Amino acid sequence: MKRSKQMSESIELGILLALSGGLMDAYSYIYRDHVFANAQTGNILLFGIQLAEKNWTAALHYLFPISAFVVGIALADIVRMKTDEKNFHWRQICVLIEAFVLICVAFFPQSMNTVANSLISFACGIQVESFRKIHGQGIATTMCIGNLRSATQNLCEYWSTKNRKAVEKGMLYYGIIICFVMGAVLGNACIRYLHGKAILVSAGLLAAAFLLMFVDKEKEEKEAASHRKVYRK
């Protein structure tokens, strides 16, 4: 299956995942004790600071999400290796697990913020490992620093070489960043009205992503059948 035809690498799916990623990060920061569930660099930094100040309890506050993120990555890889993909693509299974985890988080009181943030980080780890590319380009849907670097690099390449493909790649990266920001804006608005249940909107976006990947499966089967006919001729 060609990269450009993989729904797991499509722009449509990337938009849904980036919206969900932005919403998750806004939710964990605004509603769940100012923890960035997606960007573990900040959590690792704060973990180190708390260790230096010998604030052991505060250090654990950041260590749990970091550990959960790692477990999420590992789980996604296990699903990839163990799934036979007869009925569902392994990425669809990962999205379902992620959505289920976020639904559970919606019912956790704020007294359980550490657990809630750890589960959100777990879900983000799954998403980071499962969806690495859009149109063949390495793009993250739960954080922006790598996307920002790649976008700027491609625009600089276009300025130097006038290669149209470079500017198209740059706009793709910037577009995903914009979708992430829109997800954060959406998350902020949802928290005002839905409070702890706002994370259900993110689960809904992931459910839409799950269904969208069925479209690709149907196309793939039709294309495979067409190729077989051509080969027989």
Image (tube, rainbow, N blue to C red):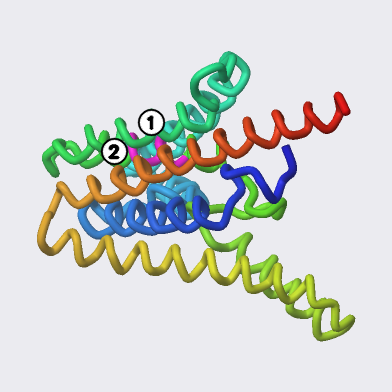
Q: Tag on residue 181?
A: none
* Outermost front residue: 233
Q: Is residue 201 above or below residue 162?
A: above
Which residue is depicted at the point 48% across and 48% down? 40
**Mark 1 packing: few (<14 Cα in 10 Å), some, or many (20+)?**
some
Which residue is depicted at the point 70% across and 72% down? 168
CB contact under 8 Å: marks 2 and 1: no
Q: Which residue is mark 1?
A: 96
Left or right of 74, for residue 93:
left
Q: Position of residue 96 (x, y in %)?
A: 38, 31
Q: Magenta span: helix, strand or loop, mainly?
A: helix
Range drawn in magenta: 119-124
Which residue is depicted at the point 61% across and 66% down? 173
Left or right of 173, for residue 110:
left
Q: Tag on residue 102?
A: 2
Q: How many marks?
A: 2
Q: Is residue 155 above or below residue 190?
A: below
Q: Position of residue 88 (x, y in %)?
A: 50, 24
The answer to if 196 sits in the magenta stretch is no
Q: Nearer the viewer, residue 68 or 211?
A: 211
Cα distance in 3D space between marks 2 and 1: 10 Å
Name the quadrant of the C terminus.
top right
Which residue is depicted at the point 74% across and 43% down? 2
Q: Position of residue 211 (x, y in %)?
A: 41, 39
Q: Quadrant of residue 188?
A: bottom left
